[in-house]
Image (cartoon, coloured by chain):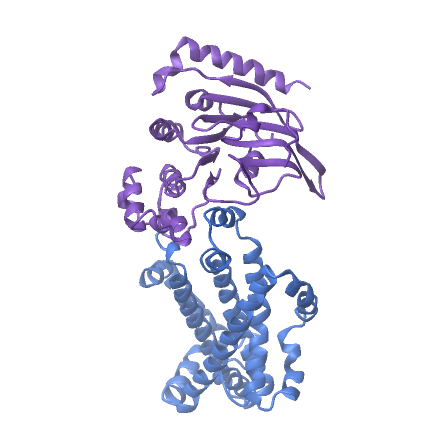
Amino acid sequence: MLKQLQSALNWRGLVAISGFFLTWYLVCALELPGFSEIPNPLEVIQMFVREYALDDHYWLSWVTSFQRVLYGFLLAQLFGIPVGLLFGTNEKFRNLFFPVFELLRPIPPLAWVPMSILFWPTNESSIIFITFIGAFFIIVINVFDGVRDIKREHLWLALSLGAPRRVIFARIMLPSVIPSIAVGMTLGIAITWDVVIAAEMIASDSGLGRLTWEGYVSSTPEVLVIGMISIGLAGYLSTKLVNVIERKMMPWRRGRQ
Amino acid sequence: MSMPSSDTAIKDKSGIWLDDVSKSFSSPESGTTSVFKNLSIHFEPNELHVVMGSSGCGKSTLGYLLAGFIPPDQGKVGLGKKTVTEPGPERLLVFQETALWPWMTVLENVVFGPKVRGDADIGNIEAAGQKLLAKFGLADFSEKYPDQLSGGMKRRAEIAQALINRPEVMILDEPFRGLDVMTREILQEYYLDLFEETRQTTVFITSELEEALFLADKIYIMGGQPAQILNVIEVDLPRPRNFEVSVSKKYLEYKEQAIQCLFQSDEP
């Protein structure tokens, strides 16, 4: 991972990043149209060091948002993987439930917000539910596709060697689907952060999304920028974590030529 | 039970056979294609049978029928006195493109068959697998994953994966296709040595005439639509063979004969 960082951060990259902050500073200092209300990077850093770096409330926002993402994401895996496998392997189940699934799939996760608030007893559970919805459909579709893409030669070979059904499921079908599960996880974690942040702005009094929104409402634009950068960082860290897990799930991909 | 067959060879039921088999496929794009119509072939035991034909003529379908992966629409496929109704370890097929499971190590791939069947005859299955891999020059690669092997090594691993089950019949579906010429020739010699040592009934499918002539006891030239066996060439070249055989007069005569037959099959 250090190597990755090194290769991403060669001198050109450093020049570009410095250039970005310099431009940001200049457009704010010159108060170009639209930038009069936007704080410059120094103001943001000052604000962060002075009031946020050691602030419990700020770090609690991180914890809160991470928890929501984690619960929504895990629930989506827990339900999504079996449902995707059933769609792929059980024709009756697919005929029964796939039409309903396809009916609900185009509804964007945020459209579920009001219904979710009505349905769930607490705010927390409704946010986790919306987050779950965001990742669930993507994971199901990916696993379903993964099952359909299993090479028939892989199944035939196992059949001809005399493998019973449960062995074929555990040792041939499941591992075949793991790469698709991994794709579902990568896409899922990204959409989970999208949904959590939006849901927090609409329906919550905590979390990084709420922190960012409060920066706007309370006319402290430095806070808004701190929120945005924190969300970006949180998303980046989660994706990295998911990538590490994915690599653990597929040891045979490591030594690929 | 009566067998509607005129082929006396099939009636004595040894080796692997198709009797009056028809098979067609239908797809939304091209409608119904009849691959075989009333096809009967009898592959005698302990010989190396090479089925040859241009690509798309139904060679792979023949292999899949013999292996029991797909059922015939009509007619029967059988091994000895038994009718083939499903895939089984007594008739193993080595696929055209690698079918090794990428998530298992080479050794896990090789011992999969005996392990899932709980094959007690082999004794220590892992040790038997290691021994077979060593024989195939893959001793140092048993803990690698298939994607870490070269194309030629994969093919050897797949042959080992089939052989450890001691099948009655080996079916190889263009097993050396896509390999470079050197590797290909080495593997052909390799397989020939193996066959000459064991005399295992083999149906070897290929589209390469030279490969066919080098390996075969009998060459079945397939063509037409629906596909038929256009000619059977008995290749009476001495065994054990090596590549020097390809400059012998007899070899060239067989080659001439096969080429003529192949050209005829192209004419409408």
**In the image, is B236 to the left or to the right of B260?**
left
**In the image, is A139 to the left or to the right of A9?**
right
Residue A94 pos. (x, y %): 65, 63
Residue A185 appears anywhere in the view = yes
Residue A34 appears anywhere in the view = no
Q: Nearer the viewer, residue A79 or B4?
A: B4
In the image, the chain rendered in blue is A
Residue A170 pos. (x, y %): 46, 60
Residue A45 pos. (x, y %): 40, 81
Q: Quadrant of residue A108?
A: bottom right
Chain B tint in image:
purple
Q: Establish if A160 lies above or below A186.
A: above
At x 52% / y 82%, what residue is drawn?
Answer: A209
Q: Quadrant of residue B158?
A: top left
At x 52% / y 69%, what residue is drawn?
Answer: A188
At x 39% / y 43%, what residue is drawn?
Answer: B165
Residue A217 pos. (x, y %): 57, 89
Q: Establish if B10 lies above or below B78.
A: above
- Look at the image and tell me in which quarter the N terminus of chain A lies: bottom left
Count of residue discs: 0
Q: Nearer the viewer, residue B63 or B212?
A: B63
Q: Nearer the viewer, residue A209 or B191?
A: B191
**In the image, is B234 to the left or to the right of B187?**
right
Q: Residue furthest top?
A: B249
Q: Nearer the viewer, residue B227 or B10?
A: B10
